[in-house]
Amino acid sequence: QLVLTQSPSASASLGASVKLTCTLSSRHSTYAIAWHRQRPEKGPRYLMKLNNDGSHIRGDGIPDRFSGSSSGAARYLTISSLQSEDEADYYCQTWVTGSRVFGGGTKLTVL
Amino acid sequence: EVQLVESGGGLVQPGGSLRLSCAASGFTFSNYEMNWVRQAPGKGLEWVSFISSGDRTTYYADSVKGRFTISRDNAKNSLYLQMSSLRAEDTAVYYCARAAGDSTYGWGYFDYWGQGSLVTVSS
């Protein structure tokens, strides 16, 4: 079964960097994923598509302080120079024919 | 500018029906596959349904299969979700989302989202 696992919460200080993790089920360790951000009381917004080799394609208007990387079954989202507006829920998402799957989300708190 | 605007949400009794609409603009709607995604109060995102650009292929999450029907009208740049036999657990904000991807790996992720429409199933 295709499963994405995320830590429920993370925190980092204003101006610092944070690395969020999304882990694919082992049978699906080569899959690409997408990262989405959801600010409080808002709809989600696409951040980037992240491939198995770490290459990524950011969405329109997403600054380069958002970057992605991969290692084995793990997919990472790194946010540098944290700003208060980065406080949000971050979801990873992947797909197979006939289904799309989300991770449980990580709530990022900016201290 | 790509815009997706959902409408049609509201309060409905258990067992009832409701039809959501999503009006698309800022892109050639007929060229894109589309999805519905929902979010129950205080919960994470859950994919609901997919429809191909030509309306020939549809997919559904197991939780809604047989009760929900996705459709589109390319002439009206609109996406729809017909929901029937509604249950309390269908209470959620429903988002339409444009599919992104490529011919090699499929159009499996979402690059634009609407602002959502709230559906409440309660007596």
Image: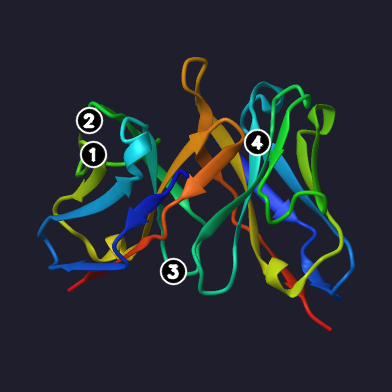
What amino acid type is highlighted by mark number 2? Gly
Q: Are marks 2 and 1 in contact (CB under 8 Å)?
A: yes
**Secondary structure found at label 1:** strand
2 or 3: tag closer to the N-terminus: 3
Indicate the chain on which mark 4 is placed: B
Q: Position of residue A47 (x, y in %)?
A: 37, 43
**Secondary structure found at label 2:** loop
Q: Are marks 2 and 3 in contact (CB under 8 Å)?
A: no
Q: CA distance from mark 1 to mark 4?
A: 25 Å
How would you rate the neighbour count of disc 4 (Cα within 10 Å): few for under 14, some for 14-19, many for 20 or more?
many
Using the rendered image, report if marks 2 and 1 lie on a common chain.
yes
1 or 3: tag closer to the N-terminus: 3
Mark identifier at residue A40? 3
| B66 to A49, vertically: above or below | below
The residue tagged 4 is B34
How would you rate the neighbour count of disc 1 (Cα within 10 Å): few for under 14, some for 14-19, many for 20 or more?
many
- Please indicate whether residue B116 sits to the left or right of residue A111 in the image: right
- Please indicate whether residue B108 sits to the left or right of residue B55 in the image: left
The residue tagged 1 is A68
Q: CA distance from mark 2 to mark 4?
A: 26 Å
Indicate the chain on which mark 1 is placed: A
Camera sees residue A35: yes
**Secondary structure found at label 4:** strand
Q: Position of residue A84 (x, y in %)?
A: 25, 66
Indicate the chain on which mark 2 is placed: A
Q: CA distance from mark 3 to mark 4?
A: 24 Å
What amino acid type is highlighted by mark number 3? Pro
The residue tagged 2 is A54
Q: Position of residue A48 (x, y in %)?
A: 35, 38
Q: CA distance from mark 2 to mark 3?
A: 29 Å
**Looking at the rendering, in which quadrant would you find the C terminus of chain A?**
bottom left
Q: Are marks 1 and 4 in contact (CB under 8 Å)?
A: no
